[in-house]
Image (cartoon, helix red, strand yellow):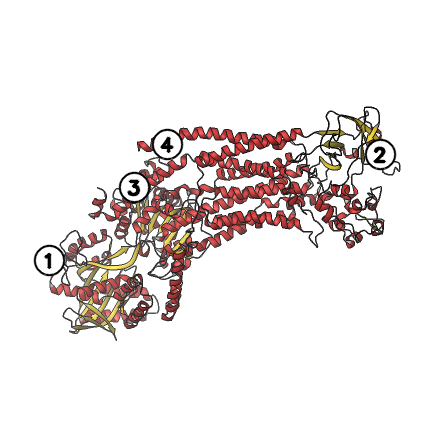
Amino acid sequence: MFTDFLSFMVLFNFIIPVSMYVTVEMQKFLGSFFITWDKDFFDPEIKEGALVNTSDLNEELGQVEYIFTDKTGTLTQNNMEFIECCIDGFQYRHREDSSELDGVCVTDGPVNKVQQKAGTEREELFLRALCLCHTVQVKESTKNGRDQIDQIDQVDGLGADEEVLHPPQKERGFIASSPDEIALVQGAMRYGFTFLGLESKNMKILNRNKDVETYELLHVLNFDPVRRRMSVMVRSKTGDILLFCKGADSSIFPRVRQEEVERIRMHVERNATDGYRTLCVAYKHLSAEEYANADAGLREAKLALQDREEKLMDVYNQVETEMTLIGATAVEDQLQDEAAQTMEALQVAGMKVWVLTGDKMETAKSTCYACGLFKKNTELLELTLRTLEDGGRRREERLHDLLLEYHKKAVQDAPPAKLGITRSWSVASHGFGFIIDGASLSMVLSSSSESNSSLYKNLLLQICQNCTAVLCCRMAPLQKAQIVRLVKNSKGSPITLSIGDGANDVSMILEAHVGIGIKGKEGRQAVKNSDYAIPKLKHLKKLLLAHGHLYYVRIAHLVQYFFYKNLCFILPQFLYQFFCGFSQQPLYDAAYLTMYNICFTSMPILAYSLLEQHICIEVLLDNSTLYREIAKNAMLRWKLFLYWTALGLFHGLVFFFGVRFLFSNPALQDNGQVFGNWSYGTIVFTVLVFTVTLKLALVTRHWTWINHFVIWGSLAFYVFFSFFWGGIIWPFLRHQRLYFVFANMLSSVSAWLVIILLILLSLLPEILLVVLRKPRGPHARQMKRRLPSSGTSTIFMLSQTASTHSFSWSD
Amino acid sequence: MMASSYKDEDGHISVSGSGAAAGGGSLRTKKPENTAFKQQRLPAWQPILTAGTVLPAFFIIGLIFIPIGIGLYVTSNNIKEFEIDYTGVDMSSPCFNCSKSFSWNSTKPCTCSIPFHLDQSYESNVFMYYGLSNFYQNHRRYVKSRDDSQLNGNEKSLEEPSKECEPYAKHDNKPIAPCGAIANSMFNDTLELFYNDPNGTKIQIPLTATGIAWWTDKHVKFRNPGVENMNLTAVFQGTTKPVNWHRPVYELDTDPDNNGFINEDFIVWMRTAALPTFRKLYRIIQRRNNMLPTLPRGNYTLEVVYNYPVRSFEGRKRMILSTISWMGGKNPFLGIAYITVGSVCFLLGVVLLIIHHKYGNRNNGADISH
């Protein structure tokens, strides 16, 4: 009895599609090459394309629900440009193009005065401060760089490359750990003060009069994220000792004399709302005595063996007091190319974009506006330290109230619009944006009591999930990961994607299902830890909407087709047991059993799963809404699985019983001779191979020559193999079961007729379904066409904002 | 498309070659090649099955299948078939005694004769089948119990039959030829047909015993061991007959071309049937005279030498007389199936046409209103 059991196991083991794993792995491995090969991902600036570190996640790209993005370097270029400064409350703005709307700008002259000019002395002091207060180094090898460029220019002489190579030449002079500092030094250069370099503790500056000023660098009070400022102490030629300090407004304002603050605060806040990164600059005259104290303190702290950091910090804090505020700078971190379009497309595609950044709220918020994540009519729900301290009550109580209030607003009163295509447009018209900062987040996550903590977490999650966009600012790297984990483990376990470029994004890249690294300026850490690396943010759109969508559809079909084809392969064999006394007699010859999944039916589905484009890439990119159609694993649901299973059952029954009824009289040849059991199996198998292959052909929407080759090739190979296998008395084999069985089968008209009949009968429901489904087709397609066109135009309008061009468009 | 991609490739190679000298070569090579395949832009045919394209297909299928079906059905109906069960289960049956008193070692064969009447005359060649029911020739252990290389005339296999033949590989320490359960259970009833002339004489109808097996089986797959025209008795020296056989394999027929392993009755038996109820070709009644029918209408007698016991497993034995058409023996299934599928296709075509027509109008209206 046990041997019977084992025999049945052997007989029916094909129902478990072992070969599917091989095919799936091959599909994933080979499929990932198409991402690497995609030239749209090639960035001429860094001369690199996309990088695929794992081949396991191709289809997850089509299932992303939440995108967590870093701001600096991801949404923005991390390419700082000095925009304006404010000295003593007077605004200095430098513009190279005169297309500005205010039209007040004058382009000639190094300094453009918008309203009035501050005193020359203050102005120069400010610029000297910019020139001195930094850790920038001057690059020595400018000549080499130039040579190299020349060489390459000679080699290819391509216009595009030339353009790419020139910008580095412009800023080739400076190296710094932070691009902000370079921007500031260059900004000062534009106003006439050029930093020439550091030579044996002497900083040289070329001033407006082309004179070289030399300052002795005494101390650098390093920048750190907690202090959020840095200072230098220099001694001028005249012997004055000066301390220049620059840093975030919040860390500078308390340390300067208050009467100067208000004038500058206005500018700083306006700049921050415009999305610029602001820094305040202050200075202080140090008397010899003060300097001696500070110097001694610093030296002592630097030599300390224990708690050196804290001691240094103490000295820094003592020195950086009672300074005089001279001005503020605004540096623009430009948005990545097509950042707004990409974000818009991703949102339309049903993904929720969360921005996780370490930057301050105002800057991040304005970036969100610029990216179109927040719109003019988006209602912002803020949960930050500022709002927590508003009510004058304890923070915990306030937090509780705020959470409940937002929850009521965003979740309970939200319109009950559920999933659907229409939702994107209703959401776009009005929605909530949620802002939370690191401090508040840690309060929510580590609330005093356990029950409160989980309640808050839930409330927060629900609020966030009902908002179109969420901004988390002032986040530590681990907090980013915490947020990702919070969403990842929430109900329905949505697929999350993290994208970032810096080392501080690594934790969230590792935490999310799909981690994407941007090959940015901040090193390769993110790229190394990511699943996919792309050069630019804009490439995310194609990666998800085209590649992700296609791979998901492909793998979904691949898996279901495999179950289907093995089901209708084994079902006749199962049914045959009822007719052979349950003796485990195989219906098909051993060669057919082995070759079915390996040779006869594997290549077409592999080619399909690599090449299929049921919707072509351009349309996928144009119609972001198409991404919603496959959201929530839509193609691997029970309904579809049952459809494929039912199809497999139907086909198996048709194959077996069709031939069974034919064999009620096995005299099928016109000379009265009869067919035996191997002929029976061969007829069933022939129908089977043709039907499953043609079924795939019916599903295929994108017939390249490869598809043609493998589909018709497989069928031809089957026929060829059958002739070959049955055409020879095989030496060394004790069985010649199939000798001339196939050829004899083809000599029988009845066999031909039954094969044609059964193939057609099996495919008939499929064709019928296609026809019945079709009436919705053209209509739906028209709808889809219409929506995105309006969508793109809104994007266009948003990005152009006040530009006069938009009027001519909407005549 | 291809031309442009090749051009790009050439340019790419030349740049990277000289770029390597400039030190930037390694970066250059990372640029993805702009070929149609790698960019997933292979020219593709994108068929869209619409009602418009499928509807004609439905009609065409219907129009082709229905005539074929009718043809098949008519052909099948024109095939004359006569079937008689001679198992001898009933007391009244002439073969009852033979079937009841069957013993393996009886030397004297039991015979019985069954009279029957043909209502219509059989004009063309008539094929005589024997049919067995409830006989699982497709049982796994039965199917594999044979040695094809022995049957192919391999001398070594003749002396040393395959293990698959067990327990019918050796008997009394002699190899069995042909070995295995299939051969051992070979059908060995002898059927003879007599026409009862209206004037009282019994005329034996000549039966042809050749042309009943597949040509390739008879001429390639099955070979007698030894060289051509050798005395079969000598060739099979040292082997023994299968346990249940009355005669050794070299005495199956007197005709040397139909004796031994290439005996066609034997070959036919060795092609295992697909289903437990089956028929196998036994003899062919050739049409002798163009003027006379092969089997005229009238009374016949089937003389059976009853050697094959089937009652122990509730089996049945039949004798079938049948004419043959281009589609084989009588089987209404194909005709009915073709007619059904054809009609369904045609009907669906009509229904879909109506739906399509109505829907198409509505669709146009909607477009205009936009």
Q: Residue B102 carries which label?
A: 2
**Kind of residue at disc 3:** Ser
Marks 2 and 3: CB-CB under 8 Å? no
**Circle nearer the viewer, 4 or 2:** 4
| Spatial CA span between label 4 and label 1 | 68 Å
From this viewpoint, is residue A431 visible?
Answer: no
**Residue annotated with mark 3:** A790
- Say which element carries label 3: helix
Chain to which the residue tagged by mark 2 belongs: B
Q: Would residue A503 be found to the left or right of residue B57 on screen?
A: left
Residue A726 or residue A500, whichever sits in front: A726
Give the amino acid at mark 2. Phe
Q: How far, Cα to Cα, is label 2 from label 1?
A: 130 Å
Chain for mark 3? A
Distance, label 2 to label 3, CA atoms, is 92 Å
Label 4 crowd (10 A; few <14 / some 14-19 / many >=20) = some
Counting from the top left corner in percent of width and height, residue A260 is at: 15, 57
Please identify the quarter of the rendering in which residue A809 is found.
top left
Residue type of the residue flagged with mark 1: Gln
The residue shown at (59%, 31%) is: B69
Cα distance in 3D space between marks 3 and 4: 23 Å
The numbered disc on residue A116 is: 1
Q: Dot 4 corresponds to which residue? A: B363
Looking at the rendered image, the quarter that the N terminus of chain B falls into is bottom left
Image location (x, y in percent) of residue B254: 83, 43
Are marks 4 and 2 in one subunit?
A: yes
Q: Earlier in the sequence, mark 1 or mark 3?
A: 1
- For disc 3, the neighbor class at 10 Å (few under 14, some 14 to 19, many from 20) is few
